Image (tube, rainbow, N blue to C red):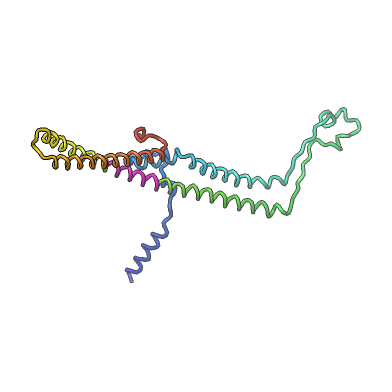
Amino acid sequence: MKRIIFLLLVTTHVFGQSVDYNKIILPSHVESPDFAEKLVQLAWQNNPLNEVLRREVKAGEYQVKRNAADWLDIIQLQGNLNEFTINKENDTYNRAAFYPRYNIRAAISLGMFASIPLNTKINRQQLAIAEANLDARKLEIRNVVMKTYNDYVLKEKIYKIQAQVFSDIENAHKLLEEKFKTGETTFEAYSASQANYNRASIVLLQAETDYKNTKLDLEKLIGLNLEDVR
């Protein structure tokens, strides 16, 4: 029984957790010692699509605020300035009574009691959609940058390993080449060494290309050269 209660508590805790989207990507003023987190910050700051989504949220906030002012349209204030309202001494026939300086009136439309609340609800939903799109973008940016960075680290290590392997094979091939020139080894041994050297060259070139391409992918995400990131 105790085990069942424990499992229920754990399950409730896990499914009850919600995502804090403000922590998905650290704010720009927060310095993280983790290099990958810094790359995520840069990708979030420098991607034009992210700015579009941020502006959509801001526009939604403005729209909701504007709905709150729609009720003010009920009251209308008008001004009427002419020679009679400005200088009453010239108004010998009291014509200003037909053209008062200020007119205040209230016009209530029954439809406003339905349309304004509905428009407010619609705009709040649109704001919620814009915020959800922005949060989804945060998750996407973090995922893509982290994966690309991990791939970059892997390709860099592979390239360095292949560079060391190639260096060893190259040195061994040069020694065998000298021996072949002096007749200390056979042509078959030299040919096998040459073929091994060529294969190592191709593997190194491929590893270097993969490494550089992944670096370019990462730089495209952050909008900067990787060497310029501090």
Extreme residue toward the bottom, this view: 1
> Can I make out residue 161 in this image?
no
Q: Residue at x 76, y 48 (%)?
A: 107
Which of the two residues, 81 or 114, is positioned nearer the viewer here? Answer: 114
| Quadrant occupied by the C terminus | top left
Q: Is residue 149 one of those drawn in magenta?
A: yes
User: Residue 140 at what x, y percent from top left?
Assistant: 43, 48
The residue shown at (88%, 30%) is 91
Q: How many marks?
A: 0
Q: Dividing the image into 4 quarters, which one contains the N terminus?
A: bottom left
Extreme residue in the right direction: 93
- Based on the picture, tell me whether residue 129 belongs to the magenta stretch: no
Q: Position of residue 155 (x, y in %)?
A: 30, 43
Task: Name the residue nearer the viewer: 210 or 156.
Answer: 210
User: Which one is in front, 178 or 157?
Assistant: 178
**165 sits left or right of 80 in the view:** left
Residue 204 seen in the current view:
yes
Q: Position of residue 112 (x, y in %)?
A: 70, 52
Q: Main secondary structure of the magenta part?
A: helix
69 left or right of 224 in image: right
166 vs 114, nearest the viewer: 166
Residue located 35% across and 68% down the image: 5
Locate residue 65 relative to residue 221 in the image: left or right: right
| Magenta stretch, residue numbers | 143-157
Residue 214 in which image quadrant: top left
Residue 218 drawn at (x, y percent): 38, 40
